[in-house]
Image (cartoon, helix red, strand yellow):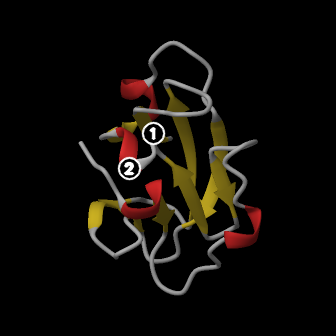
Amino acid sequence: MIQPVNSIVFVSGGGKVDVPFDKVDPDRHLVAASKSSLIVSVLPEVDGETELTFGYSNELDPGWPAGFVGEIDTPHGELIVETVDEKILVRQAVDSLTTKLRIWFNNPVWPSRVLIGID
């Protein structure tokens, strides 16, 4: 369970990344993406905790459509999920320079459950 500052987490391949701050629009999309990182919205911190689960897509698929499907660059052979204050939540080794991700949300506006799957 997490309750991050600003109600977002970052997903990246590490190193210098292009953080897509200019694409954040939580009223329309729960994910803002660039080639090298994602900003993923979670339940507003004042409303409580978010259950964040990370793993392989085929093991996490909850049976409803993913809210985000895309790829990010992973030039350092790892995928990192971290908070605004740089607390690393997940550090996962990956085998390719680009990693496909699927992200599921239990609610299209206020997700209290977020599943991040790698393919």
Q: Position of residue 65 (x, y in %)?
A: 62, 21
Q: Is residue 65 above or below residue 95?
A: above
Q: Could you tell me which secondary element the residue under label 2 belongs to?
A: helix
For this view, does 20 lie left or right of residue 58?
right
Instruction: Name which residue type carries label 1.
Output: Gly
- Mark number, residue 71: none
* Cα distance between the residues tagged 2 and 1: 23 Å
Identify the residue position indicated by label 1 in the image. 117
Relative to the observer, which residue lies in front, 36 or 45?
A: 45
Image location of residue 80, percent across then percent down: 39, 65
- Amino acid type at image mark 2: Glu
Q: Say which quadrant the N terminus sits in.
A: top left
Say which quarter of the image contains residue 32. Answer: bottom right
Q: Is residue 66 visible?
A: yes
Q: Residue at x 56, y 67 (%)?
A: 97
Q: Report whether 13 appears left or right of 81.
A: right
Give the residue displayed 28% in from the left and 48% down from the top. Answer: 2
Farthest residue, direction left: 1
The residue identified by callout 2 is: 45
Disc nearer the start of the sequence (2/1): 2
Left/right of residue 39 with respect to residue 91 in the rendered view: right
Report crowding for label 1: few under 14, some 14 to 19, many 20 or more residues within 10 A (C-alpha).
many
Instruction: Please tell me whether mark 1 sits on a helix, a strand or a loop.
Output: strand
| Residue sitting nearer the eye, 45 or 10 | 45
The residue lying at 48 percent from left, 33 percent from top is 111
- Residue 52 visible: no
Front residue of 104 and 43: 43
Q: Is residue 37 above or below residue 62?
A: below
Rendered location of residue 6, percent (x, y): 46, 62
- Quadrant of the rendered structure where residue 48 is? top left
